[in-house]
Amino acid sequence: MNLSELLIELLLMPLVAFVIGLGMVLMMRKIAARLGRRIGPPLLQPIYDIIKLYGKRTQISHGLIHEIGIIMAVGGYVAAETLLPVPGMNGLADKGGVITLAYVMMIPSLGMALGVGQCANPNGSIGISRALTAMLAYDIPFILVIFGAAYVYGTTNLADIIAIQQQQGVSGWGLMQMPLLALAGMLALPAVMGKQPFEIYIAPAEIATGPMVEMSGKFMGGLFVMQCFQLYTAGVLYTTLFLGGGAYWITFLPKIYAVVAIPMAAAMLFPRYRTEDVIRLMWKWPVLVGLMGLAVAMK
Amino acid sequence: MSKLDNIPVRHQPTEAAGRKRTNPLAHVFDELVKFCQSRSMFMLHYCTGCGAIELPPAMTSRFDMERLGIQPMVTPRQADILLITGYVSIKTLKRIILTYEQMQSPKYVIGICSCTVNGGMYWQSYATAKVLKDYLPVDVYIAGCMPRPEAVISGMRELMSDIKSGRAQNWKRYYENYDHYLGNQQKLFGEDWQTPTDIIAEARHYGLMTDRTLGEHTALLEKHQRPLEALEMRLSAREKQKT
Amino acid sequence: MNELVLMVALPLLTAFLLPVIDRLSSLAARWIGPLVLLLTAIIGLSAWSQTGSGAITIELGNFRPPLGIDLYVDQLALLFALAVTLGTLLLWPAEGEQRLRQSTLALLLAGSGSGLALSGDLFNIYVLYELIAVVSYGLAASRGTAAGQAATLRYLIVSAFGAALALAGIALVYQATGTLNLAQLAQLAPTQLNNGQGLAAFVLMLVGFGVKAELFPVNTWVPEVYATAPARVAGLLAGVVSKLALLIIVRLLILLFPQPEALTVMLVLGILGVLTGELAAWRARDFNRMLAFSSIGQLGIMFIAFSIPGKAGVFAGLAVALHHLVVKPALFLLAQRWGGSLEHLAGVAKGSPLAAALFILLALSLIGVPPLPGFWAKLLVMIHLLEQQSSLYALGAWIIMAGAALEANYLFRVASSFYRREAAATPPAAHRTGDLAGASLLGAALAAAVFLIVPLADRIEAMAGQAADRDHYIQTVNPEPLP
Amino acid sequence: MDTIIILYTGAFGLIFIGIAGIVLSRHLVRIIFAIGLLEAGANLLLLLATWRDGASAPIIVGGRVPALMADPVPQALVLTAIVIGVGILALALSLALRVQHAWGTLDMRAIRLRLEEEIDDAAGIEPPTSADAPAPRPTAPATREGGA
Amino acid sequence: MTPLDQLLLLSALTVVVPLFTGNRRITGPLATLLYTGQGLLLLRMAGLGYGSETPVSSAVSLQVLGLELHWRFDALSWFFALITIGAGLLSSWFASGEWAQRYRDSGSSLRLFHAALALNVFTMLVLLASGELLSLFIGWELVSWASFLMMSLGSNTALRYAMRYVTYAFAGAMAVLMGLVLVYTRTGSFEFQAFRDAVPSMDADTVWLLFGLFAAGFGVKMALLPFHLWQAKAYAETPGPGAAFLGAISSRMGLFAMIVVLVQIIGVARLVELPVPFTFLSGRDLLAWVAVFTIIFPTFTALRQHDARRLLAWHGIGQGGYMLLGILIADDLGSAGGLMHVFNHATYQAVLFMSVTAVIHRTGTSDLNKLGGLVARMPLSFLAMLIGIIGLAGLPPMNGFVSKWLVYRALILEGSPLLFLGAVIGTLGTILSVYKLIHNTFLGQLRLEHVDIEEAPSSMLWPMMILSTVVFVTGYFPGLVLDWIASVQAAVGLPVLAHHLGGVHIDKGGLDMIWVVSVLLAGFGVGALVFLSGNRSKRVHQLDNYAGGHFLTADTRYQYSDNFYPGLMHLIGPWYRKSFRWLEGGFVSTVDTVSQLMQGLYRHTHPAFYLLAVVVFALSWVMGGD
C-alpha cells in the first residue's frame, strides 16, 4: 500500500465512523423511545442537535483546558478510528494493534476529564469520578476479553485477527471459538458504551448531567460527536474480535449495528446501577465468565 | 408595572440584530442553522408551580415531544428554552434570572400558566412577581390554569416556527434593553441586586449594545458590582498589577 | 627485653606509692599516674617495634618454667597489654574528691591488666584476674551513690561466684596434669585434658572468666554497673577489661582444650549472648544501658567468632574484638554527658554537632557498614562461620545478622533523635573537652582504619596466626619436662 | 581410697551448697556466706588435686627425702586463694553494710527493685506504669525485713 | 586513569564542592555544572566502551582480606548511570534557584542538601560500577546510607520515616550479606563469573535460599511487597528536589542489583526450574506475583492519599512492579519493557515531583484538599504535570505507554492472563489516582488565597520542561531509548530486542509509535478544526457556574476534592485492612515482647543464671562422661 492511499484511508475512516456513529446514536434513541412506547426522534435528529450546538451564539468557556479537553475528546477518537480496520480499509491496524487501541481509547476520556475539571463545577468532577470508577469496573472484563482474543489468535494486529476468522467462515468466528469470552465481552459492552443502565455518571437530576454540566454549545456538540465515535468503536471492536469483522460493508454494517443494539435493548430495561453496583456487577459476572472463557480458550 | 396588552408574542427584529449577511452561501448556512435550531430544542423546565405536572405527559408516550426534537435538559448551559411553569415568587425569580443569564443565546423563554402572564390566582400576593416579561424577555406565553399538554406542544410549535423564520429574537432584547429589565429587578430585589453574569460585557461581546442598554439602573449596578473577569492563564502576577 | 616486666611492675609500684607521693605533693600525685602509664605505653610500643613478628618469653627471676613463672610476649599479648595501658590513659577515671583512690585503682588496673595479658601461668592469671576484679569493684562503686554500691555488690556476688568456679576449674586442670604453666599444659593437653574432665574444667573456667567478658549467663551485672558507674569506668570495663578476660579464655581454649565440645559450648553461649543482648538493648530506654546491652551483644559475637576452630576463628574474633575495643570506649566517653534517658537526647545535634557526628560514625561501624572496619570484621566472622558447614555455626551467622539489624534500628533511633527539630526539655550539657577529644581520637583512629584496612588486616592475620599456633607457644617457652 | 572419696564429696558438696545458697537465699549476708562456702569448696578441690594418701609435708629435713610427699604447689596456691577470698568477702560485707545504711534493707529483691528505680530516676525515665494506676509505690521501703 | 575513574573522581568532587561553597547561592549552579561534567564524561564513555563486549573497568582495585575488589562499567551500569546523573543534574538545577533561597531562609542547610544529593549520585555510581559481589554490597550499603542522609534532611516526620527506611534497608542488606557469604563459601570467590559457574551445580535448596535472600534484600530497596511500607512516606517527606531524585532513581538500584544477581548470574531460566512446594508455581512465578501485587496494592493505596507527594511516592512503588515483572518475563520484549520503564519512570516521576514541589513552593501546601484551579496561575507547571501523569498512567503518546505496552505484549505472548490482568488493574488504578492528583491541584476552583500567585520560577521550570520534552520525545521515538536497552540486554545476556525508531516490529502485531503519535496529533488537529468551526467562545469567571440557581460568591468553596471516588471506596474501602501495617506492627510487638523477656532475664532479682551456669556445668560434666 502506498502512502497516498493510506492517507486517504486515514481521512476516510473517521468520517465513515462518524456517519455510522450518527446512525447508532439515532438507533439508540429510537430503541429507547420504542421501549417506552414513544415514536422517538426523526431520522436526522442527531445531526440537528450537533449543528444547533455548533451554531449557538454563546459559547461559554472556562478556560483553555476546557477547550483543549474537548479537542482531545474528539481528536482521540478520530485517531482511534484509524487503528480499527473496517472492510476495505486497514488504516494503521498493523502499527498499533488492539492494546494500543484500548489505550488510545482512554485519551478522549482523559481529555474530557481535563476539560470538565477546568470547569470548576463539582457536579462535573463528581461525574468524572463516577465515570472513571465505571471505567475501572468495565475495563477489567474488557481487558480479559482482549487478552483472550489476542492470545487465541496469536496476534494483536486487528487486521490479522479478521483475516484469521474469515479464513474459516462462520465457524471460525471468535463467537464460535470462544463463546464464553464473547459472552463476557457482550456483558461488559453496555458499560463500555456508558449507556443505560450504567449512566449514573451523568445522573441528570442528581448532578445535572455530571461531566456535561458546564458544557454548552460546541463543547456539548463535541461530546455528541464523541458519543458517535464511542458507540462505533465499541461495536466495531467487538465485531472484529468475535464476529469475524467484515469483508464487505453489506455484512459488516448489520453486525456492528446488532452488536450495539442487542445489549442496549436488553440493558435499557434495567434500572440505573449505582457506582458501586456497577463495579460489583462488572467484577462479578463478566469477569467470572471471562476467566472461565480464558481457561477454556488457553487449554 | 406593566399593562396586560403589552404581552409581546411576536417581535419584529430589532435594528441592532438585523445586520444582513451578503454572502449567499452564508445565508444558506444561516438558514440551515436556524432550521436545526428549530428542530432541536433543549428545554430547561423551571418547575415553579402547578404547570410542571403537565410536562411529563407531554414528554412521555402519550404526546412524545422527542419526535419534535424537544428534549429536557437539566442545566442552563445546555438548554435553549427556559420553561417557567407557574407562579414566580420573588425568591424564585432571582434564581430564574440567574438561570436565564447563564443560558446560551439564542435562548428563549416560555411562560406557562396564567400566573406568569399576570399573576393569575396569586395576583394579590405580596410574595409573587406578577408579570414575568417585566424581568425577562418572554417569547411565548401559554396561558391556562393549567394548560393541557396539547397546549404546551402547540406553544412549542409556535416557537419552532418563530425560530425557523427568524422572528424569535427576544433574547437580544434583554441585552438591548438591559437597563429596563435591571430597573424592574432592582425595584423588586433592592438596589444591591446583581448576578455573577456580566450582562453589559456580554452585550458588548455580541455587539448588542444600544443606548437603552445602559442607564441609571446599570449605573447603580456598576457602583457596587465588581465584574467577574475570566481567570485567564498567566505566567506571572505582574500583568495583573498593570491592569 | 626484660623492661617489659616494667609494664606490669611500674604501675603497680606507683599505685602502692601513690599515697606517699600525695603526702609530698598533691600535684605530683595528680600527674604521676598518667605519666607512668605514658611511660609504660612507650615501653610497650618500643617492645612492639622490637619484637616484630616473633614471640618471646620472659622468665621471672630466671627460673625456668614450669617451676618459674614466665611472661609470654607475643604480638597479641603485647597488643592487649598496650591496649590496657592506653585505654586506661584515655579513660583516666580519676576526678573529683576521690581522685587519689581512683588513680590508685586505675594504676592497679593497668598494671594487673598488662600482667594478665602477658601472663603465662594459669594461677598467675587467676590472681591477676581477681586483682582486676577487686579494682573494678572499687572503680564501679566510685561514684559513692547507694545505687552504685548496690550494683557493685551484685556485681561482686556474680564475680566471686565466677572466680570460685574458675578456681575449681583450675583445680581440675591441675589434678589432670599436675602443672599450671600454660606451655606445659599445652604440651600435656592433647593427652591429659582431651576428656570429660578437661571439658568440665574448660566450662568452669569459661563461666568463671566469662563474668568479666560479659558471657551470657553471668553478665547480669553489666547493665546495672554500667548504668551506675562513671561512664569512663564503664567504658574501661566494656572496652578493655572484657577483652582481657576474653583473651584469657581464648588462650586457654587454644592451648589447653582441643576438644570440639568446648567450642560448641562457647558458640551456644555466644549465640545466647547476642540474642539477649541485642534484644534487651532494643528496648533500653537510657543511653548507658543501651550501650551496656549492646556490648553484651558484641561480646557475644566475639564468643561466636572465637568458637570457630583454627586460625580463622582467632582472626575473625580478634578483628571484632579490636574493633569493639576502639568503638565502645568512645561511645562511653560520649555517654559521660549523654547518660540518661534517650528522650532527653532529642535535638542535641544542634548543641554538639561533633559528638552527634561521632556517634553516627561509631554506630555505623558498630553495625558493620562498609567500608568502615566493623564491616570487614563482621564479614570475616560471617565467612568463617558459614565455611564450617555446620548448622549450629550457620545459626550463629543468622543470629549475628538479625542482631545487626536490630542494632541498626536502636542505634539509629537514637541517632535520628539527635537531629529532631524540637529540643528536649532539659538538654544535656555539652561534652567536656577531654571526653570529646578522647572520643574524637578513637573516631579518627576508626576512620583512619578505613584507609589502612589492608595492612591492618594483614597484621591482625599474622597476629592471629601466631596466637593460634600452639606448637609455636610451646617452642617459645620451651619448658622443662615435668619430673 | 574411701578418704579421698569423702574428701571429694566434701569439696563438691561445699561447692554445691555454696551455689544453692547464692541462688536460694534472699538475704545478702547469707549470700555472702554462701560465697564463702563456695570458695572453700573450690579451695578444697584444688588441694585435693594432688592429694596423696599418707603423704608427708614436702619439707626436706636433714636431707631425708620422704617416700611420699604432698605436692607443695597447690597448697601455696590455696593460701593465695584464701587470702583473695577473704579480701573479697570483706569487701562484700563492707558494701553490704553501706547498702544497709543507705536503703535500710539487705533483702536482695528489695535492693534490686530499689536499684532499678534509682537508675531510672537518675536517667530521667518515667516508671512504666499507667497514669491511672491506683497509687504510687512508696519510694523508700519502710520495712526492714529479712533479719537473720 | 580510565574514563570510569575520571567519572567517579568528578562525582566525588561534586560531593566535596558543596561542603566548601556552603550555603552560598553559587552552590546549586556549581553542582549542576559538575553534574553536567559527569554527564559529558559518561557520554564520552559511551563512545569508548558502551555497546561493545568489554566493559570499561576502573584502574583502582583493592585486595582486602584476600578478597579482590574491582569496579567496571558495562552497558547496564551505563544505562542506569545515565538516568542517575540525569536525575541528579536536573534535581540540582531545580534546587539551585529560588527554591534554594527559600530552603536556606527556612533555616535548613543548603550545603548539606547538595552534598547529600551529590553523595547519592556518587554512591550510586559506585554501586553501578561494582565488579563483583563484595563491591556490589559495599556500593549497596553506601547507597542506602546516602539516601538515608537525604531523607533525614526533611522535617521530624521525615526523620521518623527515614528511620523506618534505615531499619528496613539494613535488614535487607543483612540478608544480602548473608547471601553473599553463602555464595562465597560455595565458590570461594566473590566474582560474578565464579558464582555464575557455580549455579548449575548448586542444589535446589541452595538456589532457593540464595534466591530468597537476594530477592528479599534487594526487594527492600525496590519496596517490593511486603517490604514496601517505608518508601512512600520517606520519599514524600524528603525536600522537594531530593524527592524528585530519589523517586526517579533511588529505588531502582534494587532493580539493578536484582538484574545483576537474579537475571545475569542465577538466570531466570534457573528460577523457572525452582518449584514452589505444594503449588504449581515456580520461583520466577512467585516473584512475578510479588511484582504484580507490588503494582496493585501500592497503587490503590496511592488512590487514598490526600497529599500529592505521598500519592506520587506510592505510585513510585507500584511502578517498580512493572519493571520487575517485565524483566522476569526475560524475553526480548518483556525485559526491554522492564528496562525501558526504568528510564521512563525516572523521567515522569521526576517531573511529577518537581511539579508538585513547584506547587508547594508557591502555595505552601501539597494537601490535595487545599489546592485547586492552579492551572490559571501556573500553566507550565500544569503542562509538566499533565505530561507526567499521562506518562505515569501509561497512555499514549508519552513514553510510559511504550514500556507498558512491551510488558503487556510479552505477557500476551507468554500467555499469563492473570499477571496481565494484575498489571492492567494497576494501570487503571493509576489513571484514577493521577486524575485526582491533577484535578485537585490544577483543575477545579482556584482558591481565593491563590489568586495572586505566580508561575514557578524559571530555575524550576527549565528542568520540568526539559524532562517533559524527554517524556514526550521518547514516547514519540522510543527507538532512541530502545537502542540503549538493546545494548543492556546484550550485556546482561538477555535476548536482544529487534527494534526501530518508532518501536518494534513483530509479525503478530507490533508497535510503531511514530505513526500512532502522529495520527493522534493529527486527530487532535481534526478535533481542533471541528472545535473551531463553532462560534468564538467566551471566557467566563469560575463563579459564573451552574449551581442549581444558587448564587456563588467568592468565599464559596465550590470544589469536589475529598474522598474523590466515593463509589469505589464504598465498595473496596473495607478491603484496606492495613494488613501490612498490621504485619509490621505484629513483628515489632513480637520483638518487643521477646526483648522484654530478655530484659527480664537481666533484671531478675536473683540472677537465676547461676542456675543456668550450674546446668551447663553439670551437662558438660555428664557429656564428658568422666
Image (spheres, grey):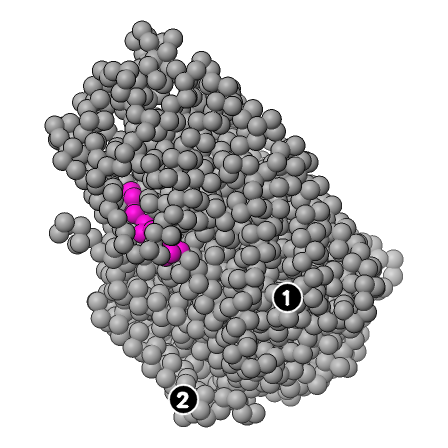
Question: Mark 2 highlights which residue?
Answer: E44
Residue B157 vertical placement versus D38 (above, below): above
Q: Quadrant of the N terminus of chain E?
A: bottom left
Question: Mark 1 highlights which residue?
Answer: A86
Name which residue lies at 47% across and 71% down: E518
Q: Position of residue E437 (x, y in %)?
A: 44, 51
Q: Position of residue B197 (x, y in %)?
A: 27, 36
SS of the residue under disc 1: loop
Q: Chain of mark 2?
A: E
Query: E69 or C61, which is in the foreground?
Result: E69
Magenta part of the chain: E531-541
In front of the other: label 1 or label 2? 1
Q: Position of residue B57 (x, y in %)?
A: 56, 24
Mark 2 residue type: Arg
Neighbour tally class for label 2: few under 14, some 14-19, many 20 plus, Cα within 10 Å: few
User: With B205 as the anchor, is C114 left or right in this view?
Assistant: right
Residue B157 within the magenta-colored segment of the rendering: no
